[in-house]
Image: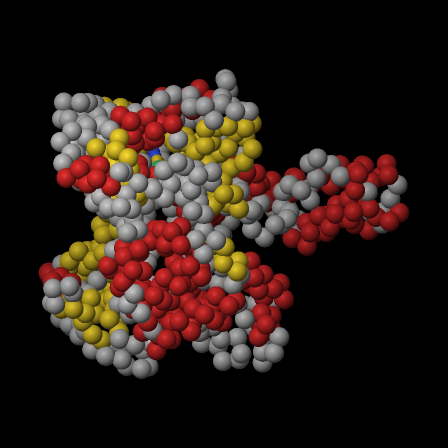
């Protein structure tokens, strides 16, 4: 580089600056290309950085001369440490799974029951390959791509617009007359061949190779530097949608055809059939072709074709009732069982884990598999040293199916299930009693918060993606801080939020520790700070109370609205208050298991203190209450008599969708009774109490008017 002949930035004339900026833009773009696309840089990193710095210095002196294609804006510039978040206007959901033809028949039967469709009424479903990639939501306004977001947790994704724009299959402008707002969703993937070629290039360059096309596609899309994405051959199939201002079609198939007209690639193997047996034939056809397809698929997705029916069917938790993924059978492989370790989970559950000699199963390297419990080890009859058969299905933890008798070595060892927890406390391992008083197969360490394994697992759950999601604080870091003795220990959730403060007086500040520096330490403190304000549902979920998963946490948050309201009820329940218990019992999907577990949790002084300390550190955001503005919200409705246009389940789901509660019995608190033919005592009671009674048609009219 002829850097010595460069004119110092302070001495540049305006004309010279214009010429320099143009030269730098071109030169840097050329290096970016060689570096990312061809993996063959021609200058050192230091020289490259010098070019970028000079460009920045000139732009700082002449801001008005900054080019539209400035290298400081586009390629290589680490402008932000992570992606901006985008809230999905319509959540991105996941799919329920079916593993056999019978599961699919059950799925169709469930739909028929829910919709009250007789056997003779045709039920039209689409069938299409389930692409093994990652989903992406593309928002178009007036036909222009305005942003692209990853699925994220389904509610909020990452803004990857710049990256998505580098994918040839994604139009920047839609063809034809698209609706004013059109969110198109689909799958980003990499073909098997492109993946193999990319790996060959990586290998030739002495770089790390990738595991499978899906992970590579995901990694490629989530590059902060869009030029890296541009250099990766990604593709896109459109198959779903989010917010749409005017629907271009009234069927699933029609929507997908509309996507094709807008300029998207759609999967050519998508079909539509009226009969389940035809769909299953299509599934088996696709299964046969699987190996020859250009891209990886892991099953077939069925969807109800009629969008009006989709709407009536609605959702359960995170998946639609109107769709299901029929997965291909799991792949299997043989390897050696080297050892069995004991893992202690968050709730103290003791799980034996098989440590295996590394083996590739369906494209993924497997080294561990679950053995579930002592009974499973006994049932399988495996011994350490055995050759075992392992199976992996999708993202599920691999399983051991059995061992090969002829290959058992003479020195194979039987495994003895421990009677005490592997932690230092050596707490006894107990078997729980189930509802009928029998010993359950699950063994637990009774140490609870005294057991360091359980505390660590609680903390890992607390910071996990669907809970507090603290960037830079994952499993590995929790292990590190948990064991710290220099003033930076994290032993309870509240400790996380005092870390930065304690760092000031720590023996060895974080920035001076191995693996950290000034920047990374500050980044961690900032990430923690960012989560000091947290939505109520995440906080409840993060506490890791047994039986309180994400969906239950959401229900609780939406029902109680604020932390104070939720805690008051939880404490009342812990004290045995029957009224509070009943109130909670009335909530959707919440029953005795959840309530007992909350009672147990809040009854424990240690837990209460832990929660108090934590909440004292936080600002908890109130939860959005569902549809409080509809005429039905907060109402208690009773459906009685025989309903003709909907099943009782659908009626209940409809009521809930509009913020009302469906109840089984009429009382003075009932607001509305929907009565079909043959209604008896409930109708009489409603009349006696002077409660409004309407028929099914009127119910539909009112709902449609909302
Ligand atoms: S439909 C509301 N169709 O599978 C349902 N999903 O397990 C929206 N996927 O997150 C999804 N191919 O990433 C649908 N043809 C297809 C798909 C597909 C792959 C993925 C998608 C989704 C996941 C759900």
Question: Quarter for ligand 1?
Answer: top left
User: How was this image coloured?
Assistant: secondary structure
Q: Residue at x 29, y 27 (%)?
A: 698
Q: Which residue is pictured at 31% across the width and 68% down the height?
A: 574
Residue at the spot x=87%, y=44% of the render? 12
Q: Is residue 660 visible?
A: yes
- If the image is split into quadrants, where does the C terminus sit? top left
Circle count: 0
> 698 or 237: which is nearer to us?
698
In the figure, 565 relative to 263: above or below? below
Q: Position of residue 410 (x, y in %)?
A: 13, 70
Q: Nearer the viewer, residue 608 or 417?
A: 608
Answer whether residue 220 is visible to the viewer in this image: no
In this rendering, the answer to whether 374 lies above or below 59 is below
Residue 195 x %, y %: 42, 41
420 sits left or right of 633 in the view: left
What's the residue at 42%, 59% (across, down)? 565
Q: Position of residue 120 (x, y in %)?
A: 14, 22
Q: Is residue 459 left or right of residue 286?
A: right
Describe residue 235's horizontal placement relative to residue 372 as left or right.
right
Q: Nearer the viewer, residue 468 or 21?
A: 468
Q: Is residue 547 left or right of residue 69?
A: left
Asked if residue 405 is positioned above or below residue 704 in the image, the reply reads below
Q: Nearest the camera: 422 or 570?
A: 570
Q: Farthest top residue? A: 176
Q: Is residue 120 above or below residue 24?
A: above
Q: State which quadrant residue 103 falls in.
A: top left
The x, y position of residue 311, in whole percent, is: 33, 31
């Amino acid at each position: 580089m002829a850097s010595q002949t460069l004119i110092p930035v302070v001495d540049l004339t305006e004309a010279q600056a214009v010429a320099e900026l143009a030269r730098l833009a071109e030169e840097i773009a050329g290096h970016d290309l060689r570096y990312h696309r061809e993996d063959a840089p021609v200058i050192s990193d230091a020289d490259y950085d010098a070019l970028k710095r000079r460009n920045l210095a000139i732009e700082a002196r002449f801001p008005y001369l900054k080019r539209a294609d400035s290298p400081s804006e586009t390629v290589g510039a680490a402008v932000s440490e992570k992606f901006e978040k985008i809230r999905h206007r319509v959540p991105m959901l996941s799919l329920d799974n079916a593993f056999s033809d019978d599961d699919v028949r059950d799925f169709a039967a469930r739909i028929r029951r829910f919709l009250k469709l007789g056997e003779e009424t045709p039920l039209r479903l689409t069938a299409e390959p389930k692409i093994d990639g990652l989903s992406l939501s593309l928002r178009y306004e007036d036909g222009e791509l305005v942003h692209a977001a990853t699925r994220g947790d389904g509610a909020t994704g990452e803004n990857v617009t710049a990256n998505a724009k580098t994918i040839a299959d994604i139009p920047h402008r839609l063809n034809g007359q698209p609706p004013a707002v059109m969110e198109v969703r689909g799958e980003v993937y990499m073909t098997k061949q492109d993946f193999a070629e990319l790996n060959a290039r990586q290998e030739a360059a002495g770089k790390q190779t990738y595991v499978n096309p899906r992970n590579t596609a995901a990694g490629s899309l989530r590059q902060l530097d869009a030029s890296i994405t541009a250099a990766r051959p990604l593709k896109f199939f459109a198959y779903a949608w989010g917010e749409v201002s005017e629907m271009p079609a009234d069927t699933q198939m029609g929507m997908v055809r509309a996507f094709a007209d807008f300029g998207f690639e759609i999967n050519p193997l998508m079909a539509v059939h009226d009969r389940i047996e035809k769909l299953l034939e299509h599934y088996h056809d696709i299964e046969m072709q699987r190996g020859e397809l250009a891209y990886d698929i892991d099953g077939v997705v069925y969807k109800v074709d009629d969008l009006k029916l989709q709407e009536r069917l609605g959702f359960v938790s995170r998946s639609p009732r109107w769709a299901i993924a029929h997965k291909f059978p799991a792949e299997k492989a043989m390897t050696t069982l080297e050892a069995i370790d004991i893992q202690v989970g968050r709730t103290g559950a003791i799980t034996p884990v098989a440590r295996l000699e590394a083996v590739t199963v369906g494209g993924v390297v497997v080294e561990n598999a679950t053995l579930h419990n002592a009974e499973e080890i006994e049932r399988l009859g495996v011994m350490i040293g055995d050759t075992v058969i392992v199976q992996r299905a999708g993202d599920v933890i691999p399983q051991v199916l059995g061992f090969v008798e002829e290959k058992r070595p003479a020195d194979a060892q039987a495994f003895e299930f421990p009677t005490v927890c592997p932690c230092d406390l050596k707490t006894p391992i107990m078997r729980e009693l189930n509802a009928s008083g029998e010993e359950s197969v699950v063994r637990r360490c009774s140490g609870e918060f005294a057991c360091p394994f359980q505390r660590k697992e609680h903390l890992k759950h607390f910071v996990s993606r669907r809970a507090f999601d603290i960037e830079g604080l994952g499993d590995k870091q929790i292990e590190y801080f948990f064991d710290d003795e220099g003033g930076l220990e994290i032993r309870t959730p509240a400790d996380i939020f005092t870390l930065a403060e304690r760092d000031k007086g720590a023996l060895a500040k974080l920035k001076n520790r191995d693996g950290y520096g000034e920047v990374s330490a500050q980044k961690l403190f900032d990430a923690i700070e960012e989560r000091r304000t947290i939505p109520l549902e995440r906080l409840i979920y993060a506490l890791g109370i047994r039986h309180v998963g994400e969906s239950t946490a959401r229900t609780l948050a939406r029902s109680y609205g604020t932390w104070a309201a939720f805690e008051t009820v939880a404490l009342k329940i812990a004290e045995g208050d029957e009224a509070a218990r009943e109130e909670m019992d009335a909530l959707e999907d919440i029953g005795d298991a959840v309530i007992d577990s909350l009672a147990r949790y809040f009854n424990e002084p240690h837990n209460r203190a832990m929660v108090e300390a934590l909440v004292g550190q936080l600002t908890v955001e109130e939860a959005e209450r569902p549809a409080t503005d509809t005429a039905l919200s907060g109402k208690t409705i009773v459906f009685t008599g025989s309903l003709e246009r909907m099943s009782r389940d659908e009626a209940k789901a409809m009521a809930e969708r509009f913020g009302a509660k469906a109840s089984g019995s009429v009382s003075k608190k009932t607001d509305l009774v929907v009565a079909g033919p043959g209604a008896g005592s409930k109708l009489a009671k409603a009349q006696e109490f002077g409660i409004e009674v309407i028929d099914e048609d009127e119910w539909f009219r009112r709902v449609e008017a909302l």
